[in-house]
């Protein structure tokens, strides 16, 4: 169900949306958490910063994904521009999520998170309700904060890595078959580290 395409500049995860757009909306909500925890650039948040520089919208995200989301207006907004954001809804109702290149163990970890949290209907309902009252804050202020203050500033204020641990723990309890893959990012998050931190520690 999840198709993964890789090149030297990005990894793209593609999967089908649902009729109520709950998969799309939950991916948007979780995207700052995923982007921060799977950060693997040459400098902090390199991929997100470059995406924002080239984006058609502030903070590299279409601004009206939640209240009153309308596909007709969405596609109209993209009619005369090339999509350059990290989350794209296609005309065939598939979703593309772009993130920085990383080792295969982390590629599989993110795949399992998407499968176990977003595509899984029961999990989607749970996490959609969990983040319902703070999703706008996470998406807009989250992206703005990690650009202004870096990952450190964001997770100390918004508990991003703690949220990642909670997401992983949910999969461990509810979809244990996926947890072996997810455990790799859980171990990093539980030590307040990102993928990029592991590269830095190896250099030193």
Image (cartoon, rainbow, N blue to C red):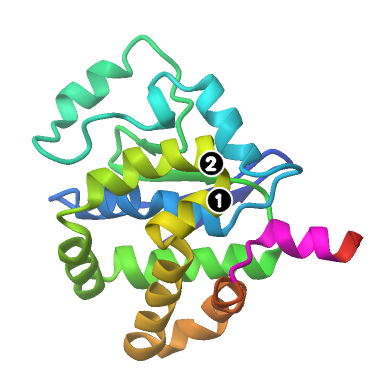
Above or below for 46 versus 102? above
Is 55 inside the magenta-drawn segment? no
Q: Position of residue 179 (x, y in %)?
A: 49, 84
Q: Is residue 17 visible?
A: no
Residue 151 numbered tag: 1
Q: Main secondary structure of the magenta part?
A: helix
Q: Residue at x 36, y 85 (%)?
A: 175
Q: Residues within 10 Å of mark 2 (few under 14, many from 20)?
A: few
Q: Closer to the camera, 172 or 131?
A: 131
Q: Residue at x 58, y 32 (%)?
A: 49
Q: Closer to the camera, 169 or 10?
A: 169
Q: Position of residue 64 (x, y in %)?
A: 21, 31
Q: Residue at x 40, y 13 (%)?
A: 81
Numbered marks: total: 2
Q: How far apart are the alpha carbons under marks 1 and 2?
A: 7 Å
Q: Is residue 122 visible?
A: yes
Magenta-tinted stretch = 192-201
Above or below for 95 versus 76? below
Residue 149 numbered tag: 2
Instruction: Say whether residue 22 is left or right of residue 202.
Output: left
Tell me the quarter of the picture where residue 4 sits: bottom right
Q: Position of residue 88 (x, y in %)?
A: 38, 36
**Viewer-nearest of discs 1 and 2:** 2
Q: Quadrant where the N terminus lies? A: bottom left
Q: Quadrant where the C terminus lies? A: bottom right
Above or below for 23 versus 42? below
Residue at the far left in the pictured view: 68
Instruction: Say whether residue 73 is left or right of residue 31.
Output: left
């Amino acid at each position: 169900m999840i198709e993964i395409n890789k090149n030297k500049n990005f990894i793209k995860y593609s999967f089908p949306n649902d009729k109520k757009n709950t998969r799309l909306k939950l991916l948007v909500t979780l995207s700052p958490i995923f982007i921060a925890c799977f950060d693997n650039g040459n400098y902090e948040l390199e991929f997100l910063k470059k995406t924002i520089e080239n984006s058609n919208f502030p903070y590299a995200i279409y601004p009206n994904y939640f209240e009153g989301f309308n596909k007709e207006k969405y596609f109209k907004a993209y009619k005369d521009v090339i999509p350059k954001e990290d989350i794209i809804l296609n005309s065939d109702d598939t979703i593309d999520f772009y993130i920085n290149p990383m080792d295969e163990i982390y590629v599989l970890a993110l795949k399992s998170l998407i499968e176990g949290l977003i595509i899984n209907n029961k999990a989607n309902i749970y996490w959609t309700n969990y983040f319902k009252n703070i999703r706008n804050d996470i998406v807009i202020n989250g992206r703005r904060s990690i650009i202004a203050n870096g990952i450190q500033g964001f997770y100390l204020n918004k508990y991003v890595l703690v949220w990642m641990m909670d997401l992983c723990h949910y999969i461990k309890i509810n979809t244990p078959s996926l947890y072996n893959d997810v455990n790799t990012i859980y171990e990093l998050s539980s030590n307040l580290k990102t993928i990029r931190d592991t590269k830095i520690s190896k250099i030193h």
